[in-house]
Image (cartoon, rainbow, N blue to C red):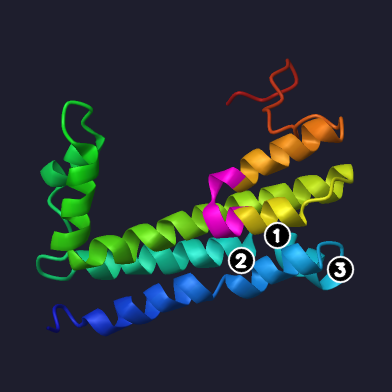
Amino acid sequence: MDIVGVSPEPIHTAFAFATFGPQPFWVLMVLLPKNEITKKIMGTMDVVIFFALVHFFIVSASIMQPDSTAPLLEFNDVFDPSKDSQAAFMNMVTNYPNFVAEEWPHVLTWDLFVGRWIWLDGLKRGIFTPHSVLFTNLIGPPGLLLHWITCLVTKKGFGSNEAPFDDDVDES
């Protein structure tokens, strides 16, 4: 059905692109982490921002589809500790066709963000990261845990990601 000029096909295409499009960038970070091409391409946030925009397109296009996004009250059930959140999530997956189309790219974009952070931390501090970056691509947060373990084993400590809270920071 074509609602407001947006049919489901662009959502399906964007979903496929959001799923497979990031893979070449993962390959660069895993197999060629120190290569100048990898540094040039992944050294900025451009790739992550691009896939965030793809995700935003999917969300925007999904909103225009009838009965494709879940009502907010049902979505809230996923986060209500007094309810069966797993059953609520499964309800979303089975009853709203674009829920997965939105959620999957959401997860993949965050994984790419974290994988890039791990890769940059490894370059900056001389830590081997291909295994951690690969695990982040394949299963998400365990890749970050693997990087943390690698940092501890190599006695390099976990990478700093702290804000500089001192008197020199402009708070305006």
In primary-sequence order, the first of circles 3 and 1 is 3
Say which residue label 1 marks.
44
Where the N terminus falls, by quadrant?
bottom left
Q: Residues within 10 Å of mark 3 (few under 14, many from 20)?
A: few
The residue type indicated by label 2 comes to Val
Q: Regarding mark 1 in the picture, which secondary structure is present there?
A: loop
Q: Position of residue 159 (x, y in %)?
A: 75, 35
The residue depicted at 63 percent of the width and 54 percent of the height is 135
> At 86% from the left edge and 35% from the top edge, which residue is drawn?
154
Judged from the image, the secondary structure of the residue bearing numbered disc 3 is loop
Name the mark nearer the viewer: 3 or 2: 3
User: Residue 43: x, y in percent?
Assistant: 75, 60
Q: Are marks 3 and 1 in contact (CB under 8 Å)?
A: no
| Amino acid type indicated by mark 1 | Thr
Vertical order, 114 against 35 (above or below): above
Residue 166 drawn in magenta: no
Along the viewing direction, whichever of 152 and 168 lies nearer the viewer: 152
Along the viewing direction, whichever of 51 and 136 lies nearer the viewer: 136
- Magenta span covers which residues? 136-142
Where is residue 70? Give x, y as percent: 16, 55
Prevailing secondary structure of the magenta residues:
helix
For label 2, the SS is helix
- Residue under label 3: 35
Q: Is residue 8 left or right of residue 103?
A: left
State yes or no: discs 2 and 1 in contact (Cβ < 8 Å): yes
Q: Label 3 is placed on what type of residue?
A: Asn
